[in-house]
Amino acid sequence: MRLRPCPRERELNLLLGRGQWPQASPDELRAHVDGCRACQELLVVRRAFTHERNRVAAQARLDSPGALWWRAQLRRRNAAIERISRPLLGAEIFALAVCLASAAAYAFWLTRRGFDWLAWLGDIPRALHLGALVPNSWSELPGGIWMAVTAGAMAALMGGVFLYFRSEKH
């Protein structure tokens, strides 16, 4: 086992890197490589790596410039949309918070003035004439059931509207 490299390895490596081996090499270097095991190993390894690099480079198929340009434009547009949508999401959250605070303040104000919420919610089915849409046996159910049905319908409706406006396909 040798601890020091061959003094001619550097020269051989330089010629191999330039692709000038063995055409532009001096005769004494070729004779040295024939007798030096370290230089022969370097030659074998460099040729194997060069051959593999050339093989892989020949297999690489680049897309057309038009497709590359189109993908770059698409990425740029998506990045711009993402940058713009961040403040919009913040504005939507702020608007929702303001609406909820306003509704809570209004409900508190109505309660302080003596508004009866349970009577009002129980009266919603009669005000909307929902009795015409359901069988007579259902109309005798207590008002709490109607309140639950109405709240569920409103939640489903608002959820659908929210999802519609949050999707990017509308």
Image (tube, helix red, strand yellow):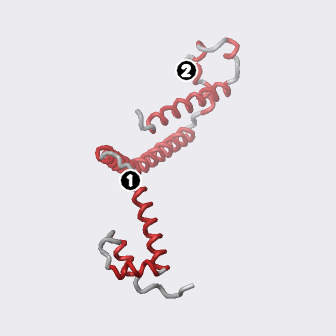
Q: Relative to 67, does residue 10 appear above or below in the rendering? A: below
Which residue, given by chain and number where applicable, does mark 1 sit on? 58
The residue that appears at 57% across and 27% down in the rendered structure is 153
State the residue in front, 91 or 150.
91
* Amino acid residing under circle 1: Ala
* Amino acid residing under circle 2: Ala
Which residue, given by chain and number where applicable, does mark 2 sit on? 127
The residue that appears at 46% across and 81% down in the rendered structure is 35
Q: How many marks?
A: 2
What is the quadrant of residue 50 in the picture? bottom left
Other-residue count near label 1 (Cα within 10 Å), few / some / many at <14 / 14–19 / ≥20 = few
Q: Relative to 138, does residue 65 appear above or below in the rendering? A: below
Residue 5, horizontal then vertical, whole percent: 47, 85
Q: Relative to 71, does residue 168 appear above or below in the rendering? A: above
Viewer can see residue 47: yes
State the residue in front, 9 or 35.
35
What is the quadrant of residue 95 in the picture? top left
Residue 41, horizontal then vertical, whole percent: 49, 74
Q: Is residue 142 left or right of residue 108?
A: right
Say which mark, if any, is on residue 123: none
